[in-house]
Amino acid sequence: MLKKCSPFFAFIILVVASAIAQADKVDDYVKTEMQRQHIPGVSIAVVKEGKIIKVEGYGLANIEHNVPARPETVYQIGSVSKQLIAAGVLLLMQDGKLRLEDKLSQFLDGTPETWKDITVRHLLTHTSGIVREAPGFDPFKVQADADVIKTAYPLPLRFAPGEKWEYCNVGYFSLAEIIRKVSGKPWGEFLKERLFLPLEMNVTRTTTLTDIVYNRADGYVWRSNKFDNAASFSALRPSGAFLSSVLDLAKWDAALYGDKVLSAAVREQMWSPVKLNSGATHPYGFGWELSSVAGHKLAQHGGSLPGFRAQISRYLDDKLTVIVLTNADGANPNLIALGIAAQYIPGLIPERTIAKIDPQLLNAHVGQYQHPAVVITITREGDKLRLQQGANAEKQDLLPESATSFFTNENRRLTYSFVKDDKGDSYLVVLLEGRETARAKKIK
């Protein structure tokens, strides 16, 4: 005769069953997005208060040899590396070897007069005014960071240091050179010594084409309805420097809950919006983009290199981090990370209701809309509108909330609104949780 379960064990069974159901939802979601986005391999980690609660690999790390993607798989992480370079600078600051207000000219030889007011802080926060890319950078040529930086010397600043925010990879080349100068050793070695080894981030290292890297993923591009091998940069870019795995990045996330690497005061600075000369702020810290999703504070960063896209999303108040690494050139790991986080944070993605509207009203929205970065095409197929951002992008269904307001299932935080101005010109306005983020004028 079976004994009745105690209330405690009944509770444990319910908790386990709930966790399994949640895990299954995450698995289903990731696999659906992989198919939709044409991604061969994905590795994810979900970390709660520094402890991994979900880790998995999906698909293939290498298509040609049928090698599965796993939690141990090593990917290029692109600009997710910036927070690690920033941490190296902050370690030197903690050591008393530099200050955030130190001038760049103290560390780099021959900087032009126009750069005299640029500080370490400006470099960390993308407010230096230096051009985004140095003209002398060649992804297929190995050269010293200092030589690459010098090719930007003759170019005028895009704005006075601290005047505004504009993404700048040269700034992170400069920070790596500062680490080398101050520490007296190659910046990759310094970070290995002071960050990766103490945190047992055993596979995180600078990118390389020649060294043997166990469990390395290959990068791919989806074109003409098939996968091709992506190009491989031979140059080591400090702005996108590292190879890593979700397991190692979970260790980095765990370290940010304590003082083992960075003190609480330094971490607070790292996640504080940069203050501009005008007194206004911009939502970027030291290698971290700052925002909120449905009222949940978020520190995050993406990364991209040919054949790879990466994302780390840290919901600060929820103490939940989602890490997504992929080996596809056109992947959107930010969207995948958001969808995973929504399984653990109720209400993160809004519920949307499809309205019934007269299909004839859709015809007014059909056409091409010029966005600064891409032409957005709206077509009608049967009784629905479809959106395509760029000639090679996948089409998405636009689902109506009204005759002029639509959303997609791919990202329910966005609203696509069709409006006319006082002159009668038509626009497609994109809103993120009610805030306008883009406006495209109808051109055809």
Image (spheres, helix red, strand yellow):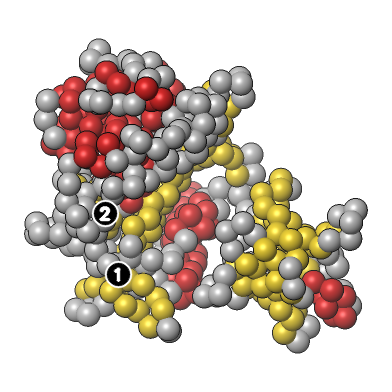
Query: Which residue is disc 1 drawn over?
Result: 230
Q: Nearer the viewer, residue 356 or 207?
A: 207
Query: Which residue is pictured at 44% across the width and 58% down the height?
Result: 333
Give me the C-alpha separation between circle 2 and circle 1: 17 Å
Residue 409's place in the image compared with 359, above or below, is: above
Labels 2 and 1 touching (C-beta < 8 A): no
Helix, strand or loop at mark 1:
loop
Asked whether, in this view, residue 100 is left or right of residue 408, the answer is left
Residue 22's place in the image compared with 283, above or below, is: below
| Dot 1 amino acid type | Ala
> Which disc number belongs to residue 65?
none
Q: Position of residue 187 (x, y in %)?
A: 18, 35
Residue 142's place in the image compared with 404, above or below, is: above
Query: Which residue is pictured at 28% across the width and 49% down the height?
Result: 137
Question: Would you say residue 202 is visible in this rendering?
Answer: yes
Label 2 CA crowd tier, 10 Å (few <14, some 14–19, many 20+): some
Query: Which residue is pictured at 56% across the width and 75% down the height?
Result: 391
Q: Pick out the residue farthest to the bottom.
A: 382
